[in-house]
Amino acid sequence: IFFRAMILLHILLSLALAVDFTVAVTVLPKVPSITLNNGVKMPAISAGCWQYNAPTAEAAIATALQVGFRGIDDAFDYKNQVGVGRAIAASGIAREDLFITTKIPGCGLQGVSRAKCGPDSVRDVETNLRQLNVSYIDLLLVHFPPIGGCGALNCGVIQSQWQALEALVAKKQVRSLGVSNFCQSCFKCLDKIPGGLKIVPAVNQVQYHIGGGADPQSLV
C-alpha cells in the first residue's frame, strides 16, 4: 500500500537572511499545485524558514506572502512559529487561501517520549496551532523516525504516534498527514498497524539537492 502512495518532494524556498525586506518586490506568477492522495491541493513550492529566529521568520514569510507565495513550511523544533503566525495574521490573506505545513518530532526526540509518543505528539500539534495562531494545519509531518530506525524496537511506538495523528484528522485539526526522512522500513512498520492503517502518508519530505549524497533505497 505504501509503495502506491504518493511520495512527493516538498520543495522549500529559503529566503536569504541578507535580503532587505523593505525593498520593492516582484509578484510571482501563480504557483502550480500538486493533488495529494486525499484530494487536497498543495502548492508545489513553499516558503521555508529553517534556521531563522522568530523575527527573521516573520519578515521572510511576510515578504513571501507579499510576492505571491501561499505555501509555508515550518516545524515545531524551528522555534520560530510565533513569528510566522504574526506574519500570517498581518497578511490579511484568508486562511483557506494558505497552505501551512508544519512538523512534530519523532518518538523519543525533542521532548516527545517513547513511552507516551501518541499523547506527546498531540500536545505538540496543539502547541503548533497556538504558535501559528490557526485552527487547523494543512499538512502535518512526522519530522524524523526515532533514533535507531523503524525496526522491532521502535515500530510499536511509531504506530501509536500515527494513530494519535489520524485522530486529529478526524477532529479537523489537520487536513493531511505525511512524514519526513522516512525510509522503506518505516513505511512497512506503518502498514502493519493493528486494526489497519486509516490514512496513508501523503508526503515523504526529503532533502534533495546537488551534492546531497546517495539514495540507497531509491526513495526519490
Image (tube, rainbow, N blue to C red):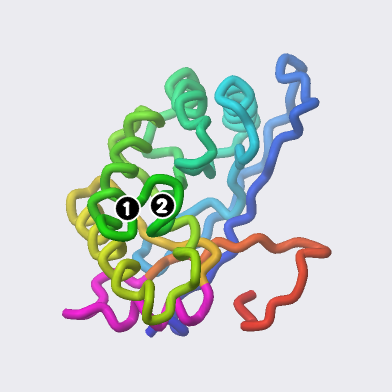
- Location of residue 208 with respect to 125 vertically, above or below: below
Report which quarter residue 49 is drawn in: top right
Identity, as a three-letter code, of the amino acid under mark 2: Leu
Q: Residues within 10 Å of mark 1 (few under 14, many from 20)?
A: some
**Outermost residue toward the right in this view:** 211
Q: Residue at x 42, y 66 (%)?
A: 202
Image position of 213 (left or right of 155): right
**Outermost residue toward the top in this view:** 22
Residue matched to label 2: 139
**Which quadrant is home to the N terminus?**
bottom left
**Do we see residue 75 in this rendering?**
yes
Label ID, residue 175: 1
- Location of residue 11 with respect to 133 vertically, above or below: below
Q: Residue at x 26, y 66 (%)?
A: 160
Identity, as a three-letter code, of the amino acid under mark 1: Arg
Q: Tell whether label 1 touches label 2 (CB within 8 Å).
A: yes
Frontmost residue, 41 versus 115: 115
Which region shows up in magenta?
183-200
Q: CA distance from mark 2 to mark 1?
A: 6 Å
**Do we see residue 165 in this rendering?**
no
Q: Position of residue 92 (x, y in %)?
A: 45, 21
